[in-house]
Image (cartoon, coloured by chain):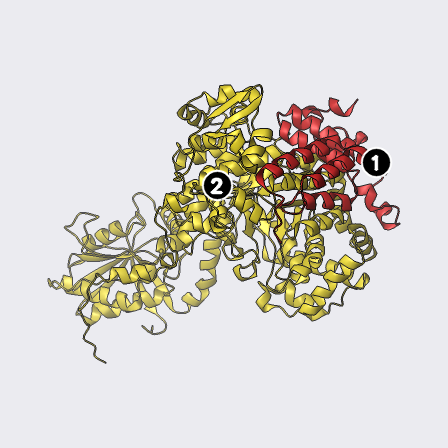
Amino acid sequence: MSDRDFSVADYPIAERRPETVRGARGRTLDDLNVEAVANGELEMEDLRITPQALLRQASIARSAGRAALADNFERAAEMTSLPQEEVMRVYELLRPGRSRGKQDLLEAAETLRSQHRASRLADFVEQAAAVYEKRGLFRKRY
Amino acid sequence: MTDTPSFQANRWRRFDDWDARALRLDKFAVEDPENGFSAFKGAADPTPSLEIAGGRVEVMDGIPATDFDMIDSFVAAYHLEPEVAAEAMAMPSQTLARMLVDMNVRREELTRLARGLTPAKLADVVAQLNAMELAFAYSKMRARSTPGNQAHVTNAKDDPLQLAADAAVAVALGFDEIETTMRVAQNSWANALACCIGSAVGQAGTLFQCSSEEAEELQIGMAGFTSYAETVSVYGTESAFVDGDDTPWSKAWLAAAYASRGIKMRCTSGAAAELLMGFHEAKSLLYLEARCLCLQRGMGAQGTQNGGIDGAPLAGSMPGGVRELLAENLLAVWLDLECASGNDARHSESDMRVGAKILPYLIAGSDLICSGFGSILKYDNSFNPSSFNGEELEEFLVLQRDFEADGGLRTIDGSSALALRRQAIDALSFVLQDLDLAEVDETMKQSVAVASGSKETQTLDPRTITEISRRVAERSITILDVMRSLHRGGFRQEVENLLFLLKLRLSGDYLQTSAVVREGRVLSAVNDPNRYLGPGTGYRPSEARRKELADIRDVLNREDVLRFEATLESAEHGRIEYRQMGQASSGTDRSEVVVGISPGLGTKFFQTLAGHPLSALLQTLKRGIEETGGVMRVVRFAHTADTSFLGLSAARLSGSGIGIGLQSKGTAVIHHRDRLPHNNLEIFSNAPLTTLAHYHALGANAASYARGESPAPIFVTGDGEALGARFHARVALIYAIETAMTFDGAVPEEITLYFKEPANE
């Protein structure tokens, strides 16, 4: 069953399809128990959502008629592979007056596309760049 | 000083009374559309329109694409669905408005059409609905079937011990989400740690957020302490948005960032935010909020917190402002967003305005009725007081019970509340010590456990609290460290509860629209959709939930009433004896006043509602009668327990024709044998306010009537107490017990009273 096959009927996944759930290091839900916590087996990575889980939720959202929410989950799926610093760096660039010009955002988009295979995020940042240029949002504010 | 009152005044003094009401602390503003003071009709609100060519929006709400600001651009690109737009925009606003209140039109059909409507059109449609229609439409359109609620858990000292204790109480009260924030920004990690541990006490599944600076909030979430966020604010004008230091794209980036870390997220918007920030563009509250909500849907946020959040008091200052708040909440759910429907910042100093405002939400239900119900006292609410706070919590519980409306909460009893508080404090204290964050002594623990608010606590000092927060952040302490520590301390259940919530992150189930966790299950618009299609459909409280709503504190029943009276019985037996002298006959003494007493008087009931022993009442009455030259004769009736009939029956036996009817709760009447039952001479119906002096005067007046005189009637005055609410449940129970003692054909019984001690008036 591919991620795209998930639908309303599989929701909640933790209840209806628990065997398909994995942490970022591959652990199953059963692996996450009090003993594993106590003996130090678990790391925060084990508690991290995977891109697969987000794509499945996107598929469920789409089957429930929520395409915009699904798009967000798909952007989020790409973002799971971004280090936190990169997430915050691009966020900062997207805030008004942070980028010196359109080029900063286009470069960030290029990095997303080439280094992180995040084409949806890259498209999104490029669209921002076009609007920011038109609306003068690169104007320095402080 | 003179005792002579002055009657000089240049206005009716009722205005002084009105000036003294809390309401008059509220300031109201005139409608001024040019300057942003208009709920529904801004001077610059556009007329709805949409032109699409080749799948691209060319003109939206009268603005050509070349003139779009960043909000228009985002809405056109991400909210509007060209496939639906032509059909939806062609529909008259009134038709859409009627569909919103038509129980036969399915919710999905309306949410589908909303995806093709522009902000101006959406606003134009909901503006057609009156307040009742808005509430009805909201009930029909909200996304999740089961209603819920959210609590604020904060305090004026940022005291972690109190946060943990209050979080545990909020969980027990049934809140689906708890939200904290800080007085001192650098205490964020200490707040997060404390609320996280507290929310794991008692039961699992309560979502938690720590409202702080964007980057830090995300980090706290990634460390596993929090499970949702709602601080992603959006605004309806470009200038306000930029002053908020963001754009729709930067906020949408955050929306994806939270989802990518498995954290539930909703946006925040709401009436009058733009006006408060000085960038209203002469547009109405509703139109600007319609723009915000289209943005949020376009961003792919699962939900919103709206309904005039910080701007609620300002919205409330305008004509129709509170109706507008309902309208913008309706827009949110019509756009298929989860709605945490405001009722957050208290919009008025008037309790009555606050109570009136909550009602439509309570009876309509909402994903989260309050997007911050102050579970703590007003002065401890670091967001500012909410509509409802710790002080008013029981009022909310009673409103739920009154309307059999599910506001998401349940009652809590005193001893289990204290036990939960202590458990939360003990768990947190252990972790603070175990992780070398702080030392907590027994006095601190106990003072916080019993305290109603932070003014009463003797707890960690401010420097220690800031130090805890600094250490958690610097040492990158995560939820795993905390769970291991709790496990070392023997807090296994709390570890399981925390783990339960963390495991839900992996499936991402609670990222879907309107998700909460109930009894170990994620409930959202996906698996618990609102399918209201008229009476008998949609959410109805189960029988178990109905009982839970009814189960408030201190509820009276028949046994309680009798048990209370039984505690008075022996003392009263020490003061009076009712000797039964056989069947009573008609008297011939022209000076006699017959007192007809009810069947339970002195046998099952022993004091009046005002708290006077019946022995004292009777002795006083006798004194009043005798001092005026009368003679008191007592007769017990068992054919009636009604005051009027007791009085009339007594009068019919009386040689003077004057009788007094007396019920055990103290209600009394003076009657004459020739009058109709309910047309008495004088009645003392306010037993809770009737003093022994009144009964003395009553006796005197009765004797005076017996002499053929016309005494001045006696007035029992009060201060307008809501006596009905205080006493009626008890009165009805007493009366039911007394009427059950009556029987047909009962003959009157002559009673001789024997007083064992003198009564004081």
Q: Is residue B69 visible?
A: yes
Residue A3 percent location from the top left of the image: 76, 25
Residue B70 percent location from the top left of the image: 57, 37
Q: Quadrant of residue B717?
A: bottom left
Residue at image mark 2: B361
Viewed as shown, does residue B295 lie left or right of B561?
A: right
- Tag shown at residue A28: 1
Chain letter for the red part: A
Name the residue furthest left.
B708
Secondary element under disc 2, as helix, strand or loop, is helix
Q: Chain of mark 2?
A: B
Q: Amino acid at mark 1?
A: Thr
Residue A121 vertical position relative to residue B623 in the rendered view, above or below: above
Residue B311 percent location from the top left of the image: 48, 49
What's the residue at 34%, 68% (across, down)? B616
Q: Amino acid at mark 2?
A: Tyr
Residue B710 vertical position relative to residue B147 in the rendered view, above or below: below
Residue B648 percent location from the top left of the image: 21, 51
Residue A131 vertical position relative to residue B754 in the rendered view, above or below: above
- Tag shown at residue B184: none
Chain letter for the yellow part: B
Residue closer to the observer: B509 or B69: B69
Q: Chain of mark 1?
A: A
Q: Which quadrant is the N terminus of chain B positioned in?
A: bottom left
Q: Is residue B336 visible?
A: no
Residue closer to the observer: B329 or B146: B329
- Crowding at mark 2 (Cα within 10 Å: few <14, some 14-19, many 20+): many
